[in-house]
Image (cartoon, rainbow, N blue to C red):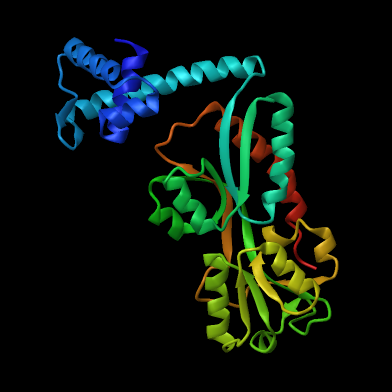
Amino acid sequence: MTIEQLKYIVAIAKYGTLKDASEDLHVTLSALSQGLNRLEKELGLTLFTRNRTGSSITKEGKVIVNHAKKVLDALDDLTEVAQVMQNRLTGTLKVASIPGPFFKLFTIVQQMKSIYPEINIQIREQNSQTMLEELLSEKVDVALAVYNDEDIQKNPNLTFTKITSCNMLIVAHQDSPVIQHNQAVTAELKKQPVIIFDDKMVIATMNEIKYAFGRNDIVISVNNPHIVQQYVEENKAYTVGLDLTFTHSKSFMQNMNFAKIDFLTTIPVEHTFGIVTKANRHETQLMKEFAYELKKEFKDYVKEITPIER
């Protein structure tokens, strides 16, 4: 039994055909087929049944492939631990984050790159719902998302690790009538234009506000958080969003009034911000190192954003 043979059966199980598996592994179809045959003969088991459409994994094959994955993961861990000891960790990590904490990630990446110059960390802004979907399809490796109990229940294949709690705010220019004396003027909520980031929690909160206090005829939803800030800074609209999205930007908040949304009873206004990963996906050393640096960095960040009362 060889490491290559274990890689062969894992790839065949993943792609369903020997041809696709051989292309992914960059080996000839003949070499892969012979390697599979030798392994099945050594184990005394049929791992895959071949047919015209591909290769179907057998009951015994599923058990063997699961063990093969664990062996290969353990070998990867061994190699990566040795790389960490020599500051030679490599690999690519795809990270998605909600707006706001996004900027903190640059500090973390710079710190990690100074230690492990060969790593590649790709970061992009995304709304929470899209992030959860892309985690399941493995388009991203790690998500910094806002979630609630409903998300946890609906996604048993994801692992949620809390960093901190966060609250929904109404944010408006200090000249706007929407907020007075640190409280939202609910009568103004339906009169003044509002612009929001296209996120399911923000939209749900805005819908509840409209239901409770009357329909607002001018509601703009955008995918760019910087446009949201621009409109609010120019006093063209107020906005609804999470404190994490706004309170990192001192230059933006210095001319703003903001208030907690504590007047809704039909929808939660406190949520959880944390790290989300795919539950059954092997956690690489790069993922572990990133999560460690992330938690360490956000301990101080959470202290900075905690005082939202004024």
Count of picture labels: 0
Determine whether, in the image, residue 36 is placed left or right of residue 285.
Answer: left
Tell me if residue 289 comes above or below residue 5 in the rendering: below
Of residues 150 and 158, the one nearer the viewer is 158
Q: Position of residue 145 (x, y in %)?
A: 56, 52
Q: Quadrant of the C terminus?
A: bottom right
Q: Quadrant of the N terminus?
A: top left
Q: Position of residue 48 (x, y in %)?
A: 18, 27
Of residues 277 and 272, the one nearer the viewer is 277
Determine whether, in the image, residue 265 is placed left or right of residue 88.
Answer: left
Determine whether, in the image, residue 194 is placed left or right of residue 68.
Answer: right
Residue 92 appears in which quarter of the rendering? top right
The residue positioned 43% from the left and 20% from the top of the image is: 74
Tell me if residue 170 comes above or below residue 282 in the rendering: below
Of residues 17 and 39, the one nearer the viewer is 17
Q: Position of residue 260 (x, y in %)?
A: 68, 70
The residue positioned 32% from the left and 32% from the top of the image is: 20
Tell me if residue 98 comes above or below residue 280 in the rendering: below
Determine whether, in the image, residue 135 is placed left or right of residue 286.
Answer: left
The residue positioned 74% from the left and 73% from the top of the image is: 231
The residue positioned 79% from the left and 78% from the top of the image is: 235
Can residue 76 be spotted in the picture?
yes
Can residue 66 be spotted in the picture?
no
Q: Position of residue 276 (x, y in %)?
A: 51, 46
Tell me if residue 8 comes above or below residue 205 in the rendering: above
